[in-house]
Amino acid sequence: MYLDYAVPFLICFPFLIAVLLLISGKSRIGNAFARIGAVVILITSAAFFVAKLMNGFSVSDRLFTHTEIADHVILGGEILLMAVVVYLCVKYKKYWISLLSIVPTAAIVYLEQTAAAEEIEHIFLDRLAMLMVLLVGIVGSLIIIYAVGYMEGYHNHHKEVQDRRNYFLALLFMFMGAMFGFVTCASLIWLVFFWECTSVCSFLLIGYTRSDEAVNNSFRALWMNLLGGAALVCGIIYFYHTVCPTLSFRTFINIIPQMTPSIGVLALIPVFLMAFAALTKSAQLPFSTWLIGAMVAPTPSSTLLHSATMVKAGIYILIRLAPLMNGNITGTVVGFVGGLTFLAASFMAVAQSDAKKVLAMSTISNLGLMVACAGIGTPETVWACVFLMLFHAVSKSLLFQLVGAVENSLHSRDVEDFHGLLYMLPKHAMFMFIGIAGMFLAPFGMLISKWSALKGMTDADNVLTVIFIVFGSAVTSFYWSKWMGKLIAHPHKTKQVKDVTEFGEMFSFWIHALIMLLLCVAFPFVSGSYVGPMIASDDLMRYVDPALTTGTMFVLVGLLLLVFLIPLILYLTEKNNASTKKPAYMGGINTGDDNGFVDSFGEEKILWVSNYYFEDKLSIEKLMKPCQALAFAALLIIGCIMGAIALSVIGGVM
Amino acid sequence: MDEMTIKMIIAICYVVFAPLIGGLLDGIGRQISARMQRRVGPPLLQPFYDLGKLLHKDPIHVSPSQNFLMLTYLFFVILTGGMIFLGMDLLLAMFLLSTAVMFLYFAAVVTGSHYSAIGAGRELLQMVAYEPCVLLTCVAFYVVSGSFETADIISGNISPIAYMPGVFVAFVFILTIKMRKSPFDISTSHHPNQEIVKGITSEIGAKNLAVYTLAEWYETVFLMGMVAMFVINKNPWSILAAVLTAFVVYFLEILIDNSSARVKSELMIKLSWTVTLVAAGGNLLVLMFMFG
């Protein structure tokens, strides 16, 4: 079918734009390339999705079975990626990291060359893949449209950083191309290539400023992600030699449940290794530190890493693996690590006043919840996981872009400096308010998903995760609401702020906010006609069990309208009612504008209250190490069990 | 009568009578407190006189947006109670209550008064302290009755409290925090001559204070309704037992209020989380073992 050629186009086109951007050097024509490229990708992915929707997402065709040329290109790409990693490792004297690239690449190339010829499909387009295409396509291209405007402001504000914006934009495009490939490919070899591709792109993006901190953080991200990649390769090789000699990802998913009774836990080893890889990519404990370090990069890359792509790649794999994790030890451990990450990261988010760090910790925390849902792997929790992923991508992308835009205008991204933002940058503050509300308030999407996750975990009788969730979500409300409070607080200084936000950025905010609200309103429809059938498909959970009944979902939509309408109506009616303004109580003579008092020497003392942070108890420095140790112990235990099984089998064979 | 009409009647009864019951409870509470302190205390209907007086004052504000924020707060508090008494989803009602409290929080931070802002920050801490237990209570009801809907929870064969005594203890504990009673009157205080003045309500006066009082009454009523839910089962007589239980719990809250001094916020969180983990968490573990 001609329609399916959209996939190679979506994969190759971003790479083409990237090459154009790299060639254009410092020239301003790069901006035009980037904008046009992003719009083309946005339209193509949306149109492709609609076209597939009309077709009813048939997966009967085996797509792209003969791909000799593409296979060669991908082989070349793998070697090229390895060369880039090795070169940079040598340049910055981090020799050991290069081993994490050389060994897996060599192994996968060897596997590819020695594998028996088989006719497998290379592209697989079910509803899950298409959902990811849409998510990456829309959110990703909006981020790029935003990035073009952002980098202008960024380089005016950060003169010390060398202006390589076209290189930066090129990386963003490569990232998108790799992501499209990752979510659509059905060949394990291709999967590894696109996986490594996202790892290397994120490594280069984090190191963009070339400051010492950026370089260190980028190498930390690199080794953690390469370690995951190595686990992925191990899993694939193990699967090929022990379970079933095929390189088809679809076979991998479908054959393991059938194999489990006959060869026991053995078939779970590749599942564990793949899930481990996903944990590194989704920045779960003990690998959360790379994502926090990624904050040194310019905001668009953090946005791309956190909301639409990188971290969602891990979740995507885990959703695919969910049926293989339900009720076994791998799932239990993945669920535990996810729940622990949700709780620990939300605690650490409380102690942050740097807005980007709050967002980073909140991302890790929400990913933890998704990981836990996938790990428990009942249709109910997977349903919750998909919605968490959707709502999180949109809200978080909006928030990251806003923080970036506010920073460019305000020259600070400290939440304490957002005090009274509503009076300085009203539009930004309103969008931020909506974005934050979307992250935790009833009845917005994230909260509904969290609620269904809670119900799903209860149904799965997983007390520990339930406890993680109830405590985690209380703390989550705390750090978000104190941020919201800052936005609308009475301003204590009258600083004029020049708004440098460009049209493209504003455009992106509007689209994000609209999509978020639309998603909330269309929630029952999306669940019934798309996510439901997706989970019930043979390649996923085989049946669906939505955590919420359709009736409840409509109640939620009604409540959503109330949450907007009631304050609005009351605002409009109260505005005209006569009410006398009184000065606030200041414990002394009020200065007149409610921000301080006049002391006994006649001087004005300006006062304001800052938020609670509990830095002495909840800082990353204090909490990260013990939590990492706990998660590491859990992974080590299961690693040892799996290793012992593998060894005993090999011993038995010999 | 069809189901819809019955629901309408319940809704109207709730909206009309809840503040009356809440106000009476407030009056009774004041009298009991007075007796505990060897005072005569105000008349039983004093809360209503106070409310009437507040409503007759000229409306005042520190920041104009306070007015609509307070009214929104009241609206969502009423809606929360409505959902509970109409037999709807308990967990959703509790989430909605958090949203309602957010509006109270907003009304306090927009004023620029630091006493009000301190109270607002502390109100969030109170939420952190009670939220896990509230959610666990909903989960426990769900495990016992197989549904989050209050209509199903109250129609079991045996009172839920038989299965969840630990959860009940934890719930009564956090009720003190939720009702802002001493020793957990962290975000506000009964007397304005203390270090945080009136905390979150420092800048709320006249009509807005009336709105706040009304919201508190509604809140008291549906919180006591939740206490009653632990006891009610299919047998109509259990309603009597439930009302008695609610009275006992309310008396207990007043007793605690009168016999303790305010603690620091961190101690509050530690205490309530420990009780939640041990009593409610332990109870839930047993429940999942029994019903799982």
Image (cartoon, rainbow, N blue to C red):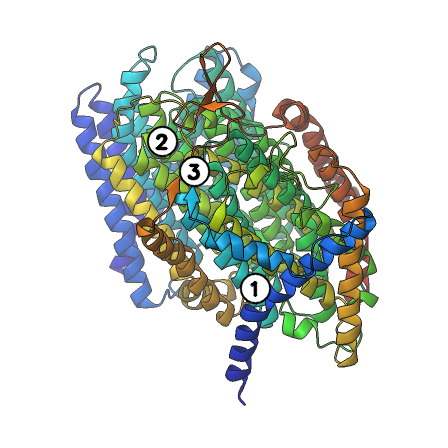
- Measuring 56% from the left and 64% from the top, which residue is drawn there? A547
A631 in relation to A118, above or below: above
Q: Chain of mark 2?
A: A
B80 in relation to B6, above or below: above
Residue at the spot of label 2: A300
The three-letter amino acid code for the residue at tag 2 is Pro
- Measuring 44% from the left and 50% from the top, which residue is drawn there? A391
What distance separates the C-alpha of mark 3 from that of mark 2?
Answer: 40 Å
- Measuring 41% from the left and 14% from the top, which residue is drawn there? A210
- Kindly state the secondary structure of the residue where label 2 is placed: helix
Q: Which mark is residue B62?
A: 3
A433 in relation to A246, above or below: above
Percent x, y of residue B211: 51, 53
Percent x, y of residue A420: 40, 31
Quarter-wise, where is residue B201 in the image? top right
Marks 1 and 3 belong to one chain: no
Q: Nearer the viewer, residue A411 or A320?
A: A411
The three-letter amino acid code for the residue at tag 1 is Ala
Percent x, y of residue A453: 59, 55
The three-letter amino acid code for the residue at tag 3 is Val
Mark nearest the camera among 3 and 2 is 3
- Kindly state the secondary structure of the residue where label 1 is placed: loop
In-image side of A97 versus A303 (left or right) = right
Quarter-wise, where is residue A272 in the image? top right
Marks 3 and 2 belong to one chain: no
Q: Nearer the viewer, residue B103 or B251?
A: B251
Marks 2 and 1 belong to one chain: yes
In-image side of A433 versus B123 (left or right) = left
Residue at the spot of label 1: A547
